[in-house]
Amino acid sequence: MGRSPSQSQSQMVEQLVAVNPYNPDILPDLQNYVNEQVSSQTYSLDANLCLLRLYQFEPERMSTQIVARILIKALMAMPAPDFSLCLFLIPERVQMDEQFKTLIVLSHYLETAKFRQFWDEAAKNRHILEVVPGFEQAIQEYAVHVLSLTYQKVPRSVVAEAINLEGVSLDKFIEQHGWIVEGKGDLVSLPRNEFNHPELRRASVANSIPLDRITRIFPVLG
């Protein structure tokens, strides 16, 4: 677990962003804060978006290294749409850089749940991604999120492909998440939720309707 950024620094950056987000003088502080997010494994979308907006007005001061780190952190925030929000603020000519084209491809694979293609592409570009600690673990948790929305029970091979683990490492991951292995060990049962068990959603919706609203409907129906 990385150390947390000092509270004073975090508060300082938040204040800078809130008070005068278009002041180019705060650009160095925002760049330093991106590096702090990387080293401490924390994240601030607002600060990063503010920096990308400033780069639009100060293109000569843009650091492609910083931009790459912002995009990698945004990928780690999926399923939130942070990557698209950040990409929108990056000029197209900059997006043509090979490292950014790679990150865009990785984003597409994640959005379409093509995890095998994602992990293969990530392995080829480890030099881009390994500068941000926690990347692999964040993507694995995103894969868990996707699986939990899709399956009640899922083949072990699908889990292995989605999180890029096999053997003992896969067993440990499954155990840590409290999943149940069924049959001969080739089927994994996922926790019930309103997405993989629609009846839970119907019950949740029904329970969310106040009784007084229901009673007011009856005379209209009658």
Image: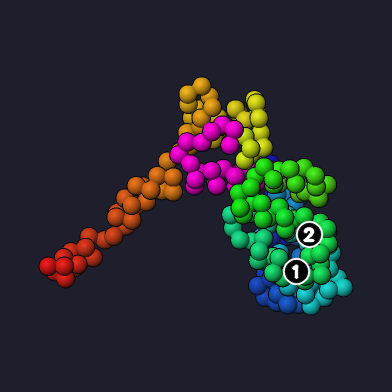
x, y percent for residue 138: 65, 46
Q: For label 1, count other residues whose C-alpha is less than 10 Å away and answer few (under 14), some (14-19) or many (20+).
A: some
Residue at the location (81% across, 64% down)? 96
Residue drawn at x 67%, y 60% is: 83
Left or right of 206? Residue 126 is right
Residue toward you, 71 or 7: 71
Above or below residue 190? Residue 217 is below
Q: 126 or 51: which is nearer to us?
A: 126
Residue 201 or residue 38, whichever sits in front = 201
Query: Is residue 46 visible in the rendered structure shown here?
Result: no
Q: Is residue 209 magenta?
A: no
| Figure quadrant of residue 31 | bottom right
Give the labeled residue for mark 2: 100
Amino acid type, mark 2: Phe
- Residue 141 covered by magenta stretch: yes
Question: In what element is the residue under mark 2?
Answer: helix
Q: Which mark is residue 90?
A: 1
Highlighted magenta segment, given as a residue range: 136-159
- In this rendering, is residue 114 above or below 168? below
Q: Position of residue 67 (x, y in %)?
A: 78, 62
In the image shown, does 134 or 119 lie closer to the viewer? 119
